[in-house]
Amino acid sequence: MSRILIFGGTTEGRLLAQYCHDKKKPVWVSVATGYGKMVLPESPYLFIHETPMDEGQMKEFIRNHDITLVFDATHPYAALVSKNIADACEHTGVRRIRVVRESLTNKEAVSEDGHTVWVESVEEAVQYLYGKSGNILVTTGSKELSKFTALDSFEERVYARVLPSVSVISACEETGIKGKHLIGMQGPFSAEMNEAMIRQFEVRYLVTKESGNAGGFLEKMSAAAECGITAVVVGRPAHETGMTPEEAKKVLEEYKPDIMEPENNRSVSEQSQKRKVTLIGTGMGGPGQMTGQALQALKSCDVVFGAERMLQNAGDMLTDKKKLPWYLSRDILPWLEEHKEYKHIGILYSGDTGFYSGAKKMIGSFLKEPYGQMYETEVLPGISSVSYLCSRLKTGWEDVHLVSLHGREGDIAEELKQYHRVFALLDGTHTVSYLCSRLMESGFEAARLSVGERLSYWDERITTGTPGALKDQVFDVLSAVLIER
């Protein structure tokens, strides 16, 4: 449980989130975009809320999650968002701390040759550029980029540097700024990098916001001065008071909310009950592959996670369940924190949970603090591909050496030199054809390969032969193979 909420999506927000991860302090982090989530560390202590919120949604989130402390670490130019955060905190009675970015005075920012123009808004920057010739490098972000399309020949003159996310790039292209005029890169940038871009695109005007040291503002101004061009600077919307990131970290370190306070009017005894998480191996995926124990556990779940194929294979067993096609802890854990009404959670895995399965990493995430105190976990095995294939071949597998070449590096010939029988999982790189060629190169022309495709399904196929006989045949990418010397 976390009662702290950080509104981030900025360098300051990332620094506070990283601090909470390092100190193992659970905290909610609200970001407006998938890119804002991507730059955060993957951590069991960070619960990410990825979509933008208006004032009403902020108030609802604060109340639903019993938030008692809010850090507003949004961008200094996001005045409306900051106002919404302030109003939401005031209405809910929650303490709010504004995390401010260091500002630079106009005098400090003026370039050496005096070629700096200060404006109060992007609109005013566009007005200044009316009637002026030469290329323009815009570094004020994507949200107000469309305003520069009012300039003559903007398609040929305007170059925009924006965040390298698909949604941002697509939105910029819709304004008419595209191709080489759209520079998708993550900053901040060195003065040398800025100079290189200015010279590469023969820029005459650099448009920027006074974003402080965290936004690489001085490096932009230095590059503009070095190249002898004009910097058009959008000043801060208003002077803000608040805490620096370092001061905010001290508050985080000392803050100890009463975690035993009843949540949403529930009793303390109700809150102390752990939720049940079961990691379920589904076997090969075909009908009747799940064990009776796994089926019983699945029936008791009220929400089930897994890859899309896993959920489809479970079919009728999940008709009355909440189903979500996720299989990574960074997606599942935050969702569970937002939906505490689900008490019995199931996570599906193909094959056996103990044989090259994602279950190993998932169970580790649930055992870490604070989740170890919140969830009771159970792992149920399934029928593995090695046991299934060997049973179809009517042979044992106690003397078989197990390897996986699925997304991994390995040399099957070296394995076969050490072990008489080797079982391997394959992928699109380590195919049957590749294995056969490698075995023939290493003198194993007489080896016997048994390739299993679509194991347990109606169109299952098992093919046995030597490397020379199988090398030119076509097999399913995700095959399993038993190789015998």
Image: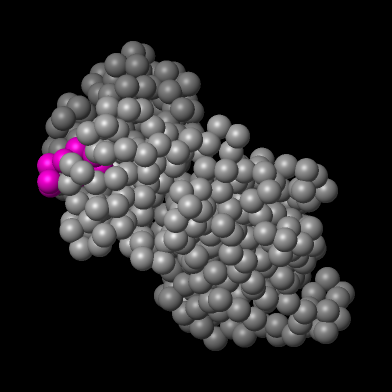
Q: At 70% across and 83% down in the image, what residue appears? A: 259
- Which of the 4 quarters of the picture holds residue 47? bottom right
Q: At 42% across and 34% down in the image, what residue appears? A: 476
In the displayed structure, 269 sits above or below 288; it is below
Q: Position of residue 294 (x, y in %)?
A: 69, 61
Q: Position of residue 115 (x, y in %)?
A: 22, 39
Q: At 61% across and 54% down in the image, what residue appears? A: 282
- Residue 262 shows in the view: no
Dominant secondary structure of the residues highlighted in magenta in the image: helix
Membership of 441 in magenta stretch: yes
- Residue 348 shows in the view: yes
- Which of the 4 quarters of the picture holds residue 212? bottom left
Viewer-closest of 113 and 370 = 370
Q: Position of residue 197 (x, y in %)?
A: 20, 35
In the displayed structure, 72 sits above or below 37; it is below
Viewer-closest of 48 and 274 = 274
In the displayed structure, 61 sits above or below 203; it is below
Membership of 172 in magenta stretch: no
Q: Which residues are magenta?
A: 435-443
Q: Position of residue 467 (x, y in %)?
A: 24, 38
Q: Quadrant of the N terminus?
A: bottom right
